[in-house]
Image: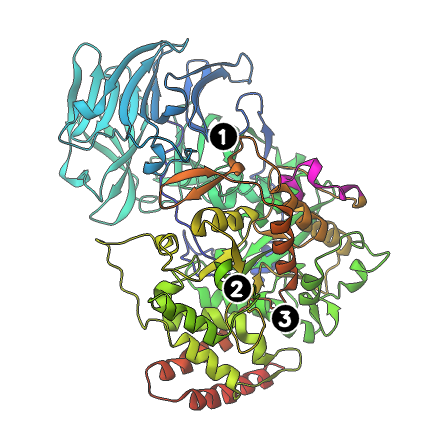
């Protein structure tokens, strides 16, 4: 139905420019006679052969809706639009976008359409979930606190083109002894409606009910771990089946001929890769969306031919989220597509027409490159938006994890080598290497741009962020957004203090008759084991031991010994009891959890901690120390400008657009100071995290003081224990001031240096194992870190 897709998305916790990932696809080949060092230069060229123009069709899809199914039926396009509050409707229109008709399905906000099929008589068949507790199954349902607990059911329904219900089948009754979920629907000329049921592929009609066409084969054992996920109708009563192959532990595609009752084609070249979503064209050919573009599938060669490149076409964050997670499309031809385009990783989409642009008509623009090991999807979206709105420049992305997908170590080395050798991009994601590059004269001093009269003088960053962006007193880097790494406790336990000592934390943990593992919960960052925590927490404590400005360190004092003793109180290992597993947030509800490790990236998360997790006043107390210092850090993507760039004006325009991206999610009422800035912003997306721009950050906080409409998804907070969305209460001005003051008070920038991290982690293990004293470990670390700092000064 316009895109076979995988329905499970996995969240990744990404630290600042130090990313753990697995590469997908094949390593890019280097031209004969060339070296891999030439890659940065080669990828700076514009690809004019695969450019398509995006035209948003706002009159077809309403704001907040996404397309769950789409197909070409006769001379019209038909689709199912699903809103975030689970209201479903059927929409049809002519291929030119005219004559739009729609109807709502019976059931209203209780009807979540799982799959659908359309026949040639104008009828629509849907398999849907009906009930108040759809969120129990992972759907984005907004349920009030006093909603009932009754579970819903799966149904199969048929509707005519006016929305009249023609039949409704309770699947729980049909398959009483099996899973009642049908995972695929298609309509064929010969067999009518066909369904992938728990017991096999069956046809269904009102007279005879379900009739078996193809028994569940052994090779597609529809069990807990192996199942057909979806169908795509092809010509001649054939269907494309997407399934999880348990035996080979991969995703697979195959064509099933219903007449022959057998598999007639396996997609060997693309099976096992969940980065593709297949969809059909008016010509009955197959097309596929991957992570970097749209392809035409050649069944004879079992190969994919690239038609559209997302980056070259500046199509939002498609490089991250089109493949596998959400992509619904239909091909009018190989030069024109109608597609529901993901805007980000939070399920926001835009329905658009994508039309081939002749290579000779692709405008020549000045190419400005941005280089990184990996760029988050929100940054990619901001780049695409900048490119669409700029007639003079285009930002070209060089991601080294894409250039070397199977070799992270080589990618890191080549990224560093290109920068040092002068082949680095115009803009660089520098992470923890900023000082090294600045000392070598590689980075551009941005101070004059932010000074009075400079290109960015009207942008005022938070004062503490400005200081973090400096090296030797000069601004060499910029950070568009930030998150706060800290620990939260109940205000009554903080007892008016803004920080706690190691002893106070220890006394509080013991008074609750719990251990450090449960006392600190599992938080949102990583598991509470000694070896994990020493690396994670050192990034927050590191400024106590290392003077990076002067390349000196001091691990021999009592501070580091106390730090090691603090970490040593946590469990040595973490054992997961899957049978008796409980959500760690229950520790806080039961008041067993005392300190919540938080990665605070939004005002709503702060509200969730207070209103749901703790259920009372909270204090961002940070981590303990020997004095009254609140141990916390801010983290975010850190960028710098290559001093050799020939495009300073373009770079400054881009910096402005990136720093002000946070305006997109704010109402005009929240930005009283907005007119004081000449901003270049438009589009759908904004960066995750808090804005580093002072007046935008203030506006973000003030936005949380307003009562939000019940239909606004941002008005709800997720309760992981009750599995319900709860209406967020507006924050008071006192709460807003407390959060602002805390964010502005943090002095530490979490920025990993992998070499130092490895030294600390390796040597600390001997202390945790009781093989060496804290003092002995400190001596070794002192020597190793001193040597490292000297060698890299």
Where residue 547 appears, x then y in whole percent?
62, 80
With respect to residue 315, does 130 lie above or below? above
Q: Is residue 673 magenta?
A: yes
Q: Which residues are magenta?
A: 663-675
Mark 1: few, some, or many residues within 10 Å (few <14, many ≥20)? many
Residue 421 circle label: 3
Q: Which element carries disc 1, helix, strand or loop?
A: strand
Is residue 373 visible to us here? no
Residue at image mark 2:
495
| Colouring convention used in this rendered image of the protein | rainbow
**Eye-nearest disc, 2 or 3:** 2
Residue at the right extreme of this rendering: 453
Mark 2: few, some, or many residues within 10 Å (few <14, many ≥20)? few
With respect to residue 219, does 740 lie above or below? below
Q: Which element carries disc 3, helix, strand or loop?
A: loop
Q: Can you say which quadrant of the picture contains the N terminus?
A: top left
- Mark before the other along the chain sequence, 1 or 2: 1
Residue at image mark 1:
339
| Quarter of the image where one finds residue 480 | bottom right
Where residue 77 appears, x then y in whole percent?
46, 18
């Amino acid at each position: 139905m316009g895109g076979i897709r995988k329905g499970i998305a996995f969240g990744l916790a990404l630290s600042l420019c130090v990313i753990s990932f697995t590469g997908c696809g094949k390593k890019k080949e280097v031209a004969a006679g060339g070296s891999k060092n030439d890659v940065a230069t080669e990828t700076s060229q514009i690809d004019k052969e695969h450019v398509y123009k995006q035209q948003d069709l706002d009159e077809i899809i309403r704001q907040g809706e996404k397309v769950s199914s789409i197909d070409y039926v006769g001379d019209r396009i038909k689709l199912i639009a699903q809103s975030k509050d689970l209201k479903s409707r059927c929409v049809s229109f002519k291929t030119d976008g005219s004559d739009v008709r729609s109807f709502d399905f019976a059931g209203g906000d209780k009807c979540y359409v799982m799959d659908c099929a359309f026949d040639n008589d104008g009828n629509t068949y849907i398999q849907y979930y009906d009930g108040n507790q759809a969120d129990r199954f992972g759907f984005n349902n907004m349920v009030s606190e006093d909603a009932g607990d009754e579970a819903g059911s799966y149904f199969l329904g048929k509707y005519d083109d006016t929305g009249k219900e023609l039949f409704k089948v309770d699947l729980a009754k049909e398959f009483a002894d099996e899973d009642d979920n049908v995972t695929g629907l298609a309509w064929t000329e010969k067999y009518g409606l066909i369904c992938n049921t728990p017991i096999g592929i069956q046809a269904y009609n009102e007279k005879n009910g379900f009739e078996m066409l193809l028994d569940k084969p052994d090779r597609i054992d529809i069990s807990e771990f192996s199942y057909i996920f979806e169908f795509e109708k092809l010509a001649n009563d054939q269907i494309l089946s997407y399934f999880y192959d348990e035996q080979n532990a991969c995703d697979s595609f195959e064509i099933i001929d219903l007449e022959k009752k057998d598999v007639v084609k396996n997609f060997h070249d693309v099976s096992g890769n969940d980065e593709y979503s297949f969809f059909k064209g008016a010509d009955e050919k197959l097309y596929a969306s991957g992570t970097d573009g749209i392809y035409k599938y050649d069944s004879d060669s079992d190969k994919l031919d690239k038609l559209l490149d997302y980056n070259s076409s500046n199509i939002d964050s498609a490089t991250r989220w089109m493949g596998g997670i959400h992509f619904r499309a239909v091909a009018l031809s190989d030069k024109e597509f109608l597609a529901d385009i993901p805007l980000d990783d939070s399920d926001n989409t835009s329905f658009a027409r994508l039309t081939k642009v002749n290579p000779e008509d692709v405008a020549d623009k000045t190419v400005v490159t941005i280089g990184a090991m990996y760029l988050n999807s929100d940054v990619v979206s901001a780049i695409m938006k900048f490119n669409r709105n700029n007639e003079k420049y285009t930002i070209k992305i060089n991601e080294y994890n894409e250039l070397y997908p199977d070799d992270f170590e080589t990618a890191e080395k080549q990224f560093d080598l290109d920068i040092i050798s002068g082949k680095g991009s115009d803009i660089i994601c520098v992470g923890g290497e900023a000082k090294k590059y600045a000392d070598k004269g590689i980075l551009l001093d941005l101070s004059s741009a932010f000074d009075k009269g400079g290109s960015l003088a009207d942008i005022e960053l938070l004062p503490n962020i400005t200081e973090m962006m400096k090296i030797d007193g000069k601004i060499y880097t910029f950070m568009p957004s930030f998150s706060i790494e800290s620990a939260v406790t109940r205000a009554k336990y903080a007892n008016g203090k803004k920080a706690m000592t190691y002893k106070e934390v220890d006394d509080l943990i013991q008074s609750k008759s719990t251990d450090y593992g449960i006392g600190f919960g599992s938080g949102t960052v990583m598991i509470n084991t000694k070896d994990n925590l020493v690396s994670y927490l050192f990034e927050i404590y590191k400024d106590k031991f290392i003077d990076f400005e002067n390349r000196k360190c001091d691990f021999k004092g009592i501070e580091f010994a106390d730090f090691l003793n603090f970490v040593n109180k946590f469990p040595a290992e973490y054992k997961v009891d899957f049978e008796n597993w409980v959500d760690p947030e229950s520790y806080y509800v039961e008041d067993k959890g005392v300190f919540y490790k938080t990665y605070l990236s939004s005002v709503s998360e702060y509200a969730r901690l207070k209103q749901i997790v703790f259920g009372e006043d909270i204090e961002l107390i940070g981590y303990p120390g020997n004095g009254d210092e609140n141990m916390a850090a801010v983290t975010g993507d850190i960028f710098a400008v290559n001093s050799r760039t020939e495009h300073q004006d373009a770079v400054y325009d881009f910096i402005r657009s990136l720093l002000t991206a946070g305006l997109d999610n704010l109402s005009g009422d929240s930005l009283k100071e907005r007119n004081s800035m000449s901003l270049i912003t438009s589009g759908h997306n904004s960066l995750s995290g808090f804005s580093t721009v002072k007046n935008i950050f203030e506006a973000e906080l003030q936005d949380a003081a307003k009562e939000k409409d019940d239909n606004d998804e941002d008005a709800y907070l997720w309760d992981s224990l009750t599995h319900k969305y709860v209406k967020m209460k507006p924050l008071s001005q006192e709460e807003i001031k407390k959060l602002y003051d805390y964010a502005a008070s943090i002095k530490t920038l979490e920025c990993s240096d992998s070499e130092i991290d490895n030294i600390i982690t390796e040597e600390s293990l001997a202390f945790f194992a009781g093989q060496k004293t804290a003092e002995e470990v400190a001596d070794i670390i002192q020597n190793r870190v001193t040597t490292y700092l000297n060698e890299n000064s």
